[in-house]
């Protein structure tokens, strides 16, 4: 099962892909932060487990764009995959290559990013002890992340009832948006509204925002949703 959100201009694209040991209370409360920056160093993502929950945050040019934001899932008929987590593995790589898109203004696209894979697992005993990985890719002009849920005992066939992913914006930015969860069948063709992001209840992606100081545009979008 894959749910891909490579979150991107400053773009945030968010994806989902389908041995736990005891730790001390101090280690569980706040593990060492993990950081990954864009090739030019301007965008930086920080990932950390705090009080057993996994959070990420984003800075651009040293300014907070996203405050610590929760990651995880809720399942129908099972405990949420959110609590009693610890980091069990990490991996990093740098990619610099080009690919050809079938349409668009530019045929050849450069894919240059730094990647951080963070695997976490529940410290709880069976039938829990479930694990998942979040893959972050940080580009000069955006950030993307996806979830990977591998087949494992206690997490074979499942139904996601709620995605717990948060985007805790540091600024009450000006947003351009169209509503979601409305009965109208043509809601994708509704006129865009403009308002502070704090007054919005639900929106369709992409959600476009401009920080109040006018220095940064933010777009939140999602892609590659398969069986999701």
Image (cartoon, rainbow, N blue to C red):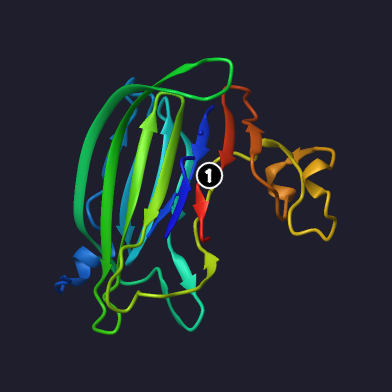
Who's the residue at 69% across and 43% down the image? 197
If the image is split into quadrants, where does the N terminus sit?
bottom left
Q: Residue at x 50, y 62 (%)?
A: 164
Give x and y (percent) for residue 204.
Answer: 69, 48
Residue 24 visible in the snapshot: yes
Q: Which residue has dot 1 on it?
A: 223
Rendering quarter of residue 120? bottom left
Residue 10 horizontal/vertical position (percent):
52, 29
Secondary structure at badge 1 equals loop
**Residue at (23, 57) in percent of width and height:** 31
| Number of residue marks | 1
Which quarter of the picture shows residue 209? top right
Reply above or below: 101 against 186.
above
Q: Is residue 62 left or right of residue 49?
A: right
At label 1, counting other C-alpha atoms closer than 10 Å, the crowd grade (few under 14, some 14-19, many 20 or more) is some
Which residue is nearer to you in this view: 20 or 31? 20
Residue 63 position, x and y percent, is 45, 31
Residue at 58% of width from left, 33% of height from top?
A: 218
Residue 25, image x and y in percent? 21, 71
């Amino acid at each position: 099962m894959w749910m891909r959100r490579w979150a991107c201009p400053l773009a945030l694209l968010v994806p989902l892909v389908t041995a736990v040991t005891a730790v001390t209370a101090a280690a569980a409360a706040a593990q060492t932060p993990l950081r990954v920056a864009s090739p030019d160093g301007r965008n930086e993502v920080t990932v950390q487990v705090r009080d057993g929950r996994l959070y990420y945050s984003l800075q651009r040019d040293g300014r907070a764009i996203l405050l610590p934001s929760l990651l995880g899932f809720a399942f129908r008929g099972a405990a949420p995959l959110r609590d009693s987590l610890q980091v069990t593995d990490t991996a990093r790589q740098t990619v610099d290559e080009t690919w050809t898109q079938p349409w668009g203004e530019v045929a050849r696209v450069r894919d240059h990013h730094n990647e951080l894979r963070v695997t976490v697992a529940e410290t709880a005993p069976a039938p829990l002890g479930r694990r998942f990985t979040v893959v972050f890719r940080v580009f000069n002009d955006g950030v993307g992340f996806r979830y990977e849920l591998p087949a494992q005992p206690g997490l074979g066939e499942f139904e996601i009832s709620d995605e717990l992913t948060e985007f805790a914006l540091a600024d009450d930015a000006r947003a351009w948006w169209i509503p979601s969860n409305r009965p109208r069948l043509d809601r994708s063709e509704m006129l865009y509204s403009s308002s502070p992001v704090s007054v919005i209840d639900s929106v369709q992606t992409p959600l476009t925002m401009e920080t109040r100081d006018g220095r940064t545009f933010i777009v939140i979008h999602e892609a590659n949703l398969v069986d999701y």
